[in-house]
C-alpha cells in the first residue's frame, strides 16, 4: 500500500447524496480481476448519456478535474452493497482521499484497507466546499493525515478524526497483513515464552 501523509491536489465535486456503489462501479464489472485497471469502470454509466457518449456535465469528464486526486461528495457516499470494486475504481483512477459528511459503512472500512482515506466533515463544511469547487473548478484542497486536517481552497482548516490503527497503516504504507508481520518478533517471543511456561 502506498504511503499517505499529506495530499495537496485538485478536488472533484460529486454534489448528490446517496451515491451508491453500483453507480461507482456497475455490477457487470465485478468479475474483473484486481489486476485490471478498475479506474476505467469508475462512474461508468452515470458519466455517460443514454447513447453511450460522455456527458460533459459530469465532473469526471471535465478537463478541470482531470488531475483531481480528492473526491468531495454529499452525504451517504458509497452506500449500498459491499463491493470492494468501488474503492478499487476510485483508487485506480488516482483518487487518494474522499471527503463527505457520511459514508456507507462497508465502503468506509474497505477504503482504509485499500489506501483511500475517507474523511468525515460536518455537512455545512462539505456543502460550502462543494459550492467552492463548482465555482472554482480545479481548486486545490489539502488533506494532512499527520495533522488530521483538511484545508479548503479559502485557507480554512478543519480537523477530522481517524482511528489510530488505520492512521498508522496509511502513514506507513502497510496493510493489516504487513502490520502483523511487523510484530513477528513479539509474536515469536510470546510463543517461545508460552511454550516454556506450559510444558
Image (cartoon, helix red, strand yellow):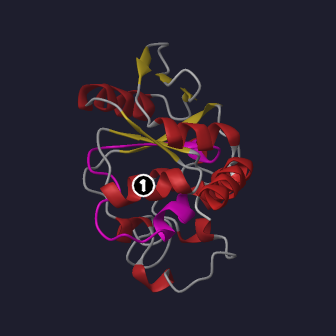
Left of 129 or right of it: where is 194?
right
| Closer to us: 181 or 60 | 181
Q: How many marks?
A: 1
Residue 187 sits inside the magenta stretch = no
Please rate how many residues cluster around mark 1, counting C-alpha atoms within 10 Å: few if below 14, some from 14 to 19, many from 20.
some
The residue positioned farthest toward the front in the image shown? 199
Residue 82 lies in the magenta stretch: yes
* Residue at the image position 54 percent from the left and 37 percent from the top: 167
Q: Nearer the viewer, residue 35 or 162?
A: 162
Q: What residue lies at 65% left-to-right and 44% top-to-bottom? A: 67
- Residue 160 seen in the figure: yes
Residue 120: name its quadrant: top left
- Above or below, 14 against 42 in this view is above
71 in relation to 198, above or below:
above
Q: At 59% from the left edge and 55% from the top edge, which residue is drawn?
A: 176
Q: Secondary structure at mark 1?
A: helix
Q: Nearer the viewer, residue 63 or 133?
A: 133
**Location of residue 13 by image quarter:** top left
Q: Is 154 on the left or on the right of 173, as rendered?
A: left
Rendering coords of residue 12 (x, y %): 49, 42
User: Is 161 above or below relative to 113?
Assistant: above
Highlighted magenta segment, given as a residue range: 65-90
Percent across and percent down for residue 43 are: 46, 65
Quarter of the image holding residue 131? Answer: top left
x and y percentages locating residue 69 in the rendered image: 60, 43
Q: Nearer the viewer, residue 154 or 59?
A: 154
Residue 186: image x %, image y %? 68, 47
Which residue is label 1 attached to? 109
Q: Is residue 195 above or below residue 40?
A: above
* Position of the C terminus by quadrant: bottom right
Residue 1 visible in the displayed image: no
Residue that extends furthest to the right in the rendered view of this protein: 185
Amino acid at each position: 500500500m502506498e504511503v499517505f501523509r499529506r495530499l495537496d491536489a485538485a478536488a472533484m465535486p460529486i454534489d448528490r447524496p446517496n451515491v451508491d456503489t453500483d453507480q461507482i462501479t456497475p455490477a457487470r464489472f465485478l468479475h474483473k480481476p484486481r489486476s485490471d485497471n478498475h479506474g476505467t469502470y469508475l462512474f461508468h454509466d452515470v458519466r455517460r448519456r443514454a447513447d453511450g457518449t460522455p456527458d460533459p456535465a459530469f465532473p469526471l469528464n471535465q478537463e478541470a478535474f482531470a488531475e483531481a486526486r480528492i473526491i468531495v461528495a454529499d452525504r451517504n457516499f458509497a452506500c449500498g452493497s459491499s463491493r470492494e470494486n468501488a474503492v478499487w475504481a476510485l483508487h485506480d483512477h488516482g483518487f487518494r482521499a474522499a471527503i463527505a459528511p457520511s459514508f456507507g459503512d462497508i465502503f468506509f472500512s474497505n477504503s482504509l484497507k485499500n489506501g483511500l482515506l475517507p474523511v468525515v466533515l460536518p455537512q455545512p463544511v462539505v456543502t460550502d466546499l462543494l459550492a467552492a469547487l463548482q465555482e472554482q473548478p480545479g481548486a486545490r484542497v489539502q488533506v494532512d493525515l499527520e495533522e488530521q486536517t483538511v484545508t479548503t481552497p479559502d485557507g480554512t482548516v478543519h480537523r477530522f478524526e481517524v482511528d489510530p490503527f488505520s492512521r498508522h497503516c496509511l502513514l506507513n504504507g502497510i496493510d493489516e497483513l504487513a502490520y502483523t508481520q511487523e510484530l513477528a518478533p513479539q509474536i515469536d517471543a510470546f510463543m517461545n515464552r508460552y511454550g516454556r511456561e506450559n510444558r
